Amino acid sequence: MSIELIIPPLGESISEAVVAKWLKPVGAKVNIDDPLAELETDKVTVTLPAPSAGVLVEQLVQVGASVRVGASIGRIDPSAQPSAVPAAPAVEAPKPAAPAVEAPKPAAPAQVAQVQVAQAPAAPAAQAPRPALSPTTRKHLREQGLDPSTATVAQPAAPVRTSSSKPPVLSEGAGPEEVVPLSPLRKRIAERLVDAQHTAAILTTFNEVDMSYIMALRSKFQDEFVKKHGIKLGFMSFFVTACAQALREFPGLNAEMRGDAIVYKKHYDFGIAVGGGKGLVVPVLRNVDKLTLAEIEKGIAELAQKAKDNKLQLAELSGGTFSISNGGVYGSMMSTPLLNMPQTGILGMHNIVRRPIAVGDNIEIRPMMYIALSYDHRVVDGREAVSFLVRVKDRLEAPEKLLLGL
């Protein structure tokens, strides 16, 4: 009895995948848990393992086909022998078409239009309208003693394409447009972004942070930090810690709408937007409120490397309670981040720019960063959102508060 290859549940909010590659051909022997197919979802690329040892006897879908969770894409026969399974028939190459008849070579052109005198027809026949003769042609006919009214201009034969003729081919990039189908990842991202705008009442509030103190702290202790922990001290760990502490005061930003109820999360699992091999992804760093700065930096670095190598697991992409996006690494000065549904809050970091600001009664040049908080107004009031962002700003401008939990 054959065993079906069923698409298993692929994680939160994922209902379909694309068969990106078959890793075993029909007729191949497989062992249990051998990877049989590569499935591409809107979040991550995963492999489908063999549920049993045997022989892959059938592939029900082709590469590039979309399949729903729970669908069957192939069959394994535990009792079959690899040699007993017929290989898929090779596609017969198309037979070459009979060569087209080559068009006769046109005669050498004369100095004047070729003219022939019409003979008296044996019977009247329908003729195409005779093209008008030019004055020069009529004069030439009279000089040769011919009647222009009974003469016609010989029309050149239409060119016949021979078997060696080929239509012109545009070079790559020659056209004004390039049509590229949406990848499953980009298609799903588009759907989620539109769904977020249609579902939530999204507002964004802004503030700015003087990064002088954090930059001075990093500069002073960077070498010791790297020597002890084996990783650089970045900005993200400060922002993660500041947000985790502020969320304790404003739990509405660490929640979600579920039907007619608000679910307040008592754990702090942050989605950190990183660039991956398939595009922007948001893997989740768990229990950030319990992690040190070094542990946060190591966790983010590990997730970012997995994203680049397309090795993120589905469990690492679901279950986030709050998100942080750093557009500043790409040079963004200000933006309005979009909610990662069903979360109710997302913080946007931006580029650090040295600008003149008022410090007391003086004007000083300071490294400043705009920060933005987008929130779901169905759950979070404006006062709560603005106060949250002020708390984050205060902790970042006085890093000692982070260490003291203030």
Image (tube, grey):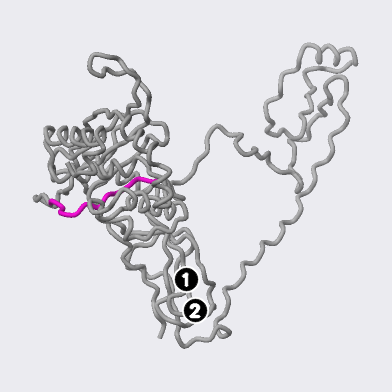
Residue 146: x percent and y percent? 86, 18
Left or right for 373, reference 18: left
Looking at the picture, tell me which residue is in the foreground, 396 or 162: 396
The residue that appears at 88% across and 24% down in the rendered structure is 110
Q: Which of the 4 quarters of the picture holds residue 104? A: top right
Taking the view exactly as shown, the residue that stands out farthest to the left is 260
Residue 379: x percent and y percent? 12, 42
Q: Secondary structure at mark 1?
A: strand
Mark 1 nearby-residue class (10 Å; few <14, some 14–19, many ≥20): many
Left or right for 102, reference 73: right
Magenta run includes residue 71: no
Q: Amino acid at mark 2?
A: Val
Magenta segment range? 264-274
Mark seen at residue 252: none
Residue 175: x percent and y percent? 58, 34
Left or right for 365, reference 342: right
Is 81 located above or below residue 72 in the figure? Answer: below
Q: Which of the 4 quarters of the picture holds residue 238? A: top left
Residue at the disc numbered 1 = 36
| Quadrant in the picture for the C terminus | top left
Magenta run includes residue 267: yes
The residue that appears at 52% across and 38% down in the rendered structure is 178
Looking at the picture, tell me which residue is in the foreground, 131 or 162: 162
Q: Amino acid at mark 1?
A: Leu
**What distance separates the C-alpha of mark 2 from that of mark 1?**
8 Å
Contact, mark 2 vs mark 1 (Cβ under 8 Å): yes
Is 245 located above or below residue 372 in the figure? Answer: below
| Quadrant in the picture for the N terminus | bottom left
Residue at the disc numbered 2 = 30
The residue that appears at 12% across and 52% down in the rendered structure is 263
Q: Secondary structure at mark 2?
A: strand
Residue 138: x percent and y percent? 81, 14
